[in-house]
Image: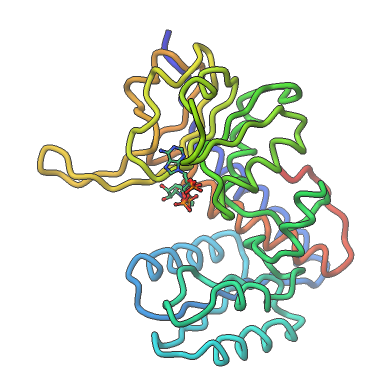
Amino acid sequence: MSATLIDGKAIAAEVLAEVAADVDYLKAQGIEPALAVVLVGEDPASHVYVRNKVLRAGEVGIRSLEYRLSVEASAEEVLEVISTLNDDPTVNGILVQLPLPAHIDENRILQAIDPAKDVDGFHSENVGGLSQGRAVLTPCTPAGCMRLLRNTIDDLRGKHAVVIGRSNIVGKPMAALLLAADCTVTVLHSRSSKPQKLCGQADIVIAAVGRPRMIDAEWIKPGAVVIDVGINRITEGGRSRLVGDVDFDAVLPIASAITPVPGGVGPMTIAMLMHNTVTAARQQHGLTAHRESY
Ligand code: NDP
């Protein structure tokens, strides 16, 4: 047996096509969705992420605004930009690219974003709403994983899902979304005892650890669906390459479906950011959704 590949690029393209249609619909109502991206400092990876987000926004018809601040910018300067964007009715989504320079308290900045414009879903109003099962703006990577799962599994209800990792941006919101989808959820972390045994009972495995190829064949029940969130750069045979948290070659013959790295979860994250921007724009104008979220 060999697992089916879950094609994140193709599913992300479907999401982006839906978003583009939603943007057209909003424009026909006189609303031009807009996303503001705030970048502080010179981190090269952050610059690449921001460039990709701006490019993708343009492709689906979302207007984007970029605010670049120097690495020496104070928290107050960043807060001033956020306050201006919060007050601007033509801006629907605000994203502050993380990480911020060490002298700035990330949480203070994230809490300053209007929750209705918080397209990353990191404000505690949205985090709390997610854990209460309310329809709120949801972190993009776990939302993307849900879309991959819904495309792969007909009925998620009652499935045992194991999430490996409990970060605020991936593991915890992932667990909340799976619970809202009526899965039975186990969350593993660095202090879990017998993690391999627990993972081996899962129908669905979400790996969000940040350790190259940690999850090998011994962790996976035959027929499980495996979503690999990890992005790890390693050097192998003198070449630099990206690998996931799952040992893809070892798990391929055991799982029923698996995401590759790259080309699995990665493309979904940015697609869900566009989806959140359109959702935010729609909600700010009191319009209801005309399709299911993810
Ligand atoms: P964090 O470092 O914030 O969290 C890692 C989690 O893994 C922690 O909860 C940690 O436990 C847990 N962990 C570490 N070692 C073990 C272990 N041996 N056994 C079980 N659990 C362990 O990472 P993120 O959540 O931010 O990211 C996880 C991965 O996903 C990274 O590779 C990152 O690059 C990738 N990522 C990919 C995205 C995408 O778009 N595809 C987006 C975001 C992240 P503890 O809490 O106890 O320390």
Instruction: Please name the residue shown 16% across and 39% down the image.
Output: 236
Q: Would you say residue 112 is visible in this rendering?
A: yes
Q: Would you say residue 20 is visible in this rendering?
A: no
Determine whether, in the image, residue 46 is placed left or right of residue 155.
left
Instruction: Please name the residue shown 56% across and 49% down the image.
Output: 170
Instruction: Please name the residue shown 72% across and 82% down the image.
Output: 86
Q: Quadrant of the N terminus?
A: top left
Q: Quadrant of the C terminus?
A: top right
Expressed as whole percent of the image width and height from the top left, the position of residue 200 reads: 51, 18
Residue 254 vs 119, above or below: the answer is above
Query: Which image quadrant is residue 216 in?
Result: top left
Instruction: Please name the residue shown 73% across and 36% down the image.
Output: 179
Residue 55 vs 238, above or below: the answer is below
Determine whether, in the image, residue 192 is placed left or right of residue 18.
left
Residue 268 vs 2, above or below: the answer is below
- The front one of 214 and 282 is 214
Expressed as whole percent of the image width and height from the top left, the position of residue 127 reads: 71, 57
Total numbered badges shown on the rendered structure? 0
Expressed as whole percent of the image width and height from the top left, the position of residue 282 reads: 80, 63
Determine whether, in the image, residue 293 is placed left or right of residue 229.
right
- The front one of 258 and 105 is 105
Expressed as whole percent of the image width and height from the top left, the position of residue 122 reads: 64, 62
Query: Which image quadrant is residue 277 in?
Result: bottom right
Q: How is the image coloured?
A: rainbow
Residue lying at the far top in this picture: please name it: 1
